[in-house]
Image (cartoon, coloured by chain):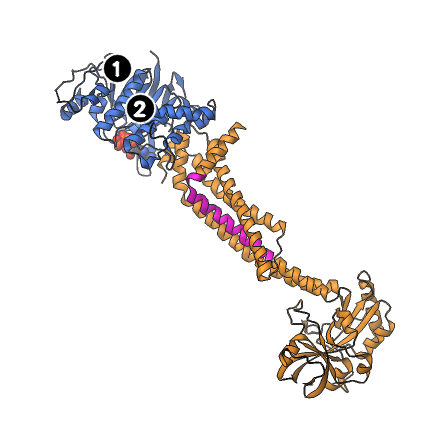
Chain colours: A orange, B blue
Amino acid sequence: MNYLKRLLRVALRSLVRSRMRSLLTSLGVVIGVGAVIVMVGVGTGASADIEDQISSMGANMLMIRPATAESQGVSQGAGSRNTLTMDDVEYLRDEATLLTAVSPVVSTNAQAIGGDGNWSTSVSGVWPEYLDVREWEIASGEMFTEREEKTKSKVAVLGQTVVEELFGSDDPVGERVRINNTPFTVIGVLEEKGTSGRGQDEDDVIMVPASTALYRLAGQQGSGHYVSMIMASAVTLEQSEEAQAEVSSILRESHDLARGADDDFEVMTQAEIMETVSSVTDVLTLLLGAVAAVSLIVGGIGIMNIMLVSVTERTREIGIRMAVGAHGRDVLSQFLTESIVLSLTGGAIGTALAYLVAYLLNDFVGLTTVILPATVGIAFGFAACIGVFFGYYPARKAAMLNPIEALRFE
Amino acid sequence: MNAVIETKALKKHYVMSAQTVRALDGVDLKVKTGEFVSIMGASGSGKSTLMNVLGCLDEPTSGTYLLDGKDISSLSRDAYADIRNQRIGFVFQGYNLLSRTTAVENVELPLFYNHSVDPGDARKAAVEALERVGLGDRLDHVPNEMSGGQQQRVAIARALVNKPSLILADEPTGNLDSRTSLEIMALFQELNEQGITVVLVTHEPDIAEYTKRIVMMRDGLIVSDKQVWDRRAATADLANTRVAAGTVGVPPAPASGPAAVGGESRAVGRDVSEQLSAGGQA
Ligand SMILES: Nc1ncnc2c1ncn2[C@@H]1O[C@H](COP(=O)(O)OP(=O)(O)OP(=O)(O)O)[C@@H](O)[C@H]1O
Ligand SMILES: [Mg+2]
């Protein structure tokens, strides 16, 4: 106990005596630890954001897309084949027991002219149920009805971005829009949705009845009513996997697929969609983590440099201490204590700074930053190890010299 | 009287790539309790090497070293450290004080490593040691705020603080002017009178005049060893530095005469060159 008190006193004295060196050393730790925590925090925050957005798309959602086509072993990407038709959608709606809502999505890109704007956007041909599936609301006006779907009416519901581009702050309900030169009446405006998990502006969209999109915009009159994808809602979140299986079997039947043949479509649950996206954000986190690790290493090299630069002075100090009777153990525990104190205070300050920066980013910049205790632990541990190693290792070498050699060290 | 220091055929060889430097080449030296010895010799003759070995700061290549009658050549590093801490006070030529550290903290340093000393008493002992060397008013000065003489005195206080029975000093006056040198010598004489054995290295024959015995070294060997018959008292010389100089010869001293008793020297100022030849050739 007495020894420990003595030790701590010697170490603290020595640290205070070399304020500049102590400051620079702990600064290395501060920066290393702080940067790692913040950067990994930003990465984690981004994935948390994305997951939030995806689940806000509707937690029970099922997404059915044509299967990925492969040409000579090279994947052509999802949706590169046309295998889903309006008949499939209707069949699903009529047969499925575990789905509450089903809607086709017929996507095309189109030029929209209206108000005093001209805007290139994407048009989604959907059924009215689409809004239920996506948990999306109408902000003003109304959604088109089943009747308008049946009659291929030229009515449109606009996303917020499209409204802004074409009409500015005016209310577009009742106005006319020309979509690929076909005149449509605006009957509603969608609520603002923000950016999707894939980084797209969800509000940059015009919704029209699916039949209208097929026959008047996509020009598919004779080509078999292919839809880009089908969206559906499972009855409950728990049953989404059962629903997924049900959808598969209904579609296989509808497509007359033989036993053992591969599906020509794929059904993804929200959980699976989340997984693909989070594998992307995991890469992001990993990347930021790598950058952070570099800053940790740079910080570590800083610590190392300062420790090594002062090694001559410190070796002489060790020589003096040993000359007046310090045992090797006394010297080593002193240097170890010094490095631990420096690394711990540096790490603590770095962590505190990281929390402060995270708070500022969250509240003032609007960048979600989530600090995980594991990151703090790893960053802290690593910086401390470097600090302790480079504080201790040269001291160990010096303590193994005899006092005269240490005093002569240059 | 018992021998504090006794070396037999002490050798220290530095093996370099081209040749072997025989810094010590068989030194036989015996120093008894209460002696005041000065070691002289040309530069490179091995004085510092000998002091370092005697001070347990460096290990000899061969030979035996009996400290207080005990052979210490087979002791552990920690035992050496304890000897340096408690039995020997070492004063370096270059002071070797911790920089940016106050005088009193520097003097306290050996006490930190002496586990029989309570940390609370350390400060008191350090202050006492500094007062003893006349630096009671410089306790909180760091080395670069002090003159060379003051730093040397801090170093001496540090050597004294654990109350050793032997003090080794390597050119303690090497960097000091003559007056400050006298002050330091007065201090050593006082310590010696209190019973501490003192061995010091010096280049200056007039400094050696204040000791009781002069050992000359050349090429790692002791070439002469003489008692000083007519030892000078530094305190008295100090008091008389401004008094008109008289001339006093040094009587030829037999090599193995009895040690002069401290404190009885005459108060005189002397011609340095005359003294040089006297001290060196006697
Ligand atoms: N670490 C070393 N490595 C090699 N040779 C050394 C070492 N230390 C001392 N020597 C040699 O040993 C010899 C004696 O050195 P030492 O320092 O003992 O001399 P000195 O008598 O104290 O000289 P000075 O009066 O100049 O201080 C010298 O020739 C020196 O070159
Ligand atoms: Mg020397």
* Magenta highlight on residue A27: yes
User: Judging from the image, what secondary structure is the residue with disc 2 in?
Assistant: strand
Residue placed most toward the observer, A184 or A373: A184
Image quarter (top left, top right, bottom left or bottom right) of the N terminus of chain A: top right
Please tell me whether the stretch drawn in magenta is mainly helix, strand or loop: helix
Q: Nearer the viewer, mark 1 or mark 2?
A: 1
Vertical placement of A91 versus A397: above or below? below
Where, by quadrant of the figure, is residue A179 drawn? bottom right
Residue A228 coordinates in the image, percent (x, y) = 73, 76
Instruction: Specify start and end residues of the magenta stretch as a single range.
Output: A15-41
Give the amino acid type for the residue marked by disc 1 in the picture.
Gly
Left or right placement of residue A128 versus residue A276 in this view: right
Residue B262's disc number: 1
Is residue B281 among the parts visible in the rendering? yes
Residue B26's disc number: 2
Q: Chain of mark 2?
A: B
Vertical placement of B250 versus A398: above or below? above
Ligand 2: does it lie within 8 Å of the C-beta at label 1? no
